[in-house]
Image (tube, helix red, strand yellow):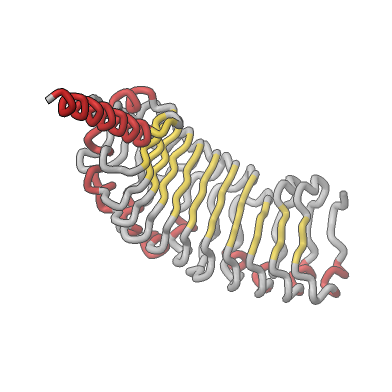
């Protein structure tokens, strides 16, 4: 592996794809890489020694797909924020990252997907999310210091979430409930997945306001013991998956569980991976078949 790209890389004027993933030696990019006006995909995940992004990173006007690892404490707003074609951004294994962007970040109108993995010092997303006005998919995994509840619902962040369609959060110990700012995506949010958030305790009553929600997955949240009282009003919900939530699963037993009536209307119900809705349907079919055979026998004896 090499420690730096040659400055002559700028001569590759038609280069569209550059993959430096898992280069454990590279420490810097020459600023000349920013002259690659045709570059659409740039991958440098797990480049653990990379100190900084190039000064004129925002000049990559054709860049659509970016995966990065860097040792910076925050991403330069004039870099990422100026990538006018960017659709997909993954940030992973950034051990020093404390906030997404520095001050001065302008609204980004093209980014559709943001994935953040293994950023153990990341504390807040408020400075970043409020700028992402076209964001549709947000995925966050293994960010132990991240506080998603620190954003006031009246902040400008709401502007950046009105298009959100999918939310996935995993291994975020400080997550105790769904953040209230999700309510601004009430008409677009279709998919929520909470995974291995061991302090997650609450699904809020305003969940019923998510008029487009179709799939809800809750995995590995043993402190979650009940569902919202008006959850039966989620008429668009097509699937619910609950796993490794022992007390809640016990309360969702078909017909007899205290929480069953709240989810009985959902077509696909999975408890610890078992399709409970299918089992209930099969039981009903078996009962109908037995009753039909019994009535036929009675009629034949009359």
The location of residue 216, given as percent across then percent down, is 39, 44
Left or right placement of residue 124 versus residue 288 in this view: right
Residue 74 seen in the current view: yes
Looking at the image, which residue is at 81% across and 51% down? 26
Q: Is residue 45 above or below residue 263?
A: below
The location of residue 300, given as percent across then percent down, is 18, 27
The location of residue 190, given as percent across then percent down, is 39, 54
Quarter of image, res 301:
top left
Left or right placement of residue 119 versus residue 38 in this view: left
Looking at the image, which residue is at 47% across and 43% down? 169
Q: Is residue 194 above or below residue 89?
A: above
Looking at the image, which residue is at 65% across and 51% down? 72
Quadrant assignment for the C terminus: top left
Q: Is residue 84 above or below residue 250?
A: below
Left or right placement of residue 58 versus residue 29 in this view: left
Give the mark count: 0
**Is 7 or 227 nearer to us in this picture?**
227
Residue 198 seen in the current view: no
**Is 193 or 67 nearer to us in this picture?**
193
Looking at the image, which residue is at 73% across and 45% down? 48
The location of residue 237, given as percent across then percent down, is 33, 48
**Is 22 or 250 nearer to us in this picture?**
250
């Amino acid at each position: 592996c090499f420690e730096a790209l040659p400055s002559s890389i700028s001569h590759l004027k038609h280069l569209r794809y550059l993959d430096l993933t898992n280069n454990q030696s590279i420490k810097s990019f020459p600023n000349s890489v920013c002259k690659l006006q045709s570059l659409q995909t740039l991958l440098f995940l797990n480049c653990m020694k990379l100190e900084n992004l190039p000064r004129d990173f925002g000049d990559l006007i054709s860049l659509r797909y970016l995966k990065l690892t860097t040792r910076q404490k925050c991403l330069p707003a004039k870099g990422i924020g100026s990538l006018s074609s960017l659709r997909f951004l993954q940030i992973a294994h950034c051990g020093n990252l404390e906030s997404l962007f520095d001050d001065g970040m302008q609204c980004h109108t093209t980014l559709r997907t943001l994935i953040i993995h293994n950023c153990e010092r990341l504390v807040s997303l408020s400075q970043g999310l409020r700028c992402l006005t076209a964001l549709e998919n947000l995925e966050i995994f293994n960010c132990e210091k991240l506080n998603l509840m620190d954003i006031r619902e009246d902040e400008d962040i709401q502007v950046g979430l009105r298009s959100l369609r999918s939310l996935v959060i995993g291994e975020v110990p400080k997550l105790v409930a769904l953040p209230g700012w999700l309510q601004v995506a009430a008409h677009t949010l279709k998919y929520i997945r909470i995974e291995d958030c061991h302090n997650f305790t609450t699904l809020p009553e305003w969940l019923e306001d998510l008029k487009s929600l179709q799939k809800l997955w809750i995995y590995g949240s043993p402190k979650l013991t009940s569902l919202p009282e008006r959850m039966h009003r989620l008429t668009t919900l097509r699937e619910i998956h609950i796993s490794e939530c022992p007390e809640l699963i016990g309360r969702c037993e078909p017909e007899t569980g205290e929480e069953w009536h709240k989810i009985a209307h959902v077509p696909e119900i999975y408890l610890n991976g078992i399709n409970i809705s299918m089992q209930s349907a099969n039981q009903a079919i078996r009962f109908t078949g037995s009753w039909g055979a019994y009535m036929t026998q009675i009629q034949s004896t009359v």
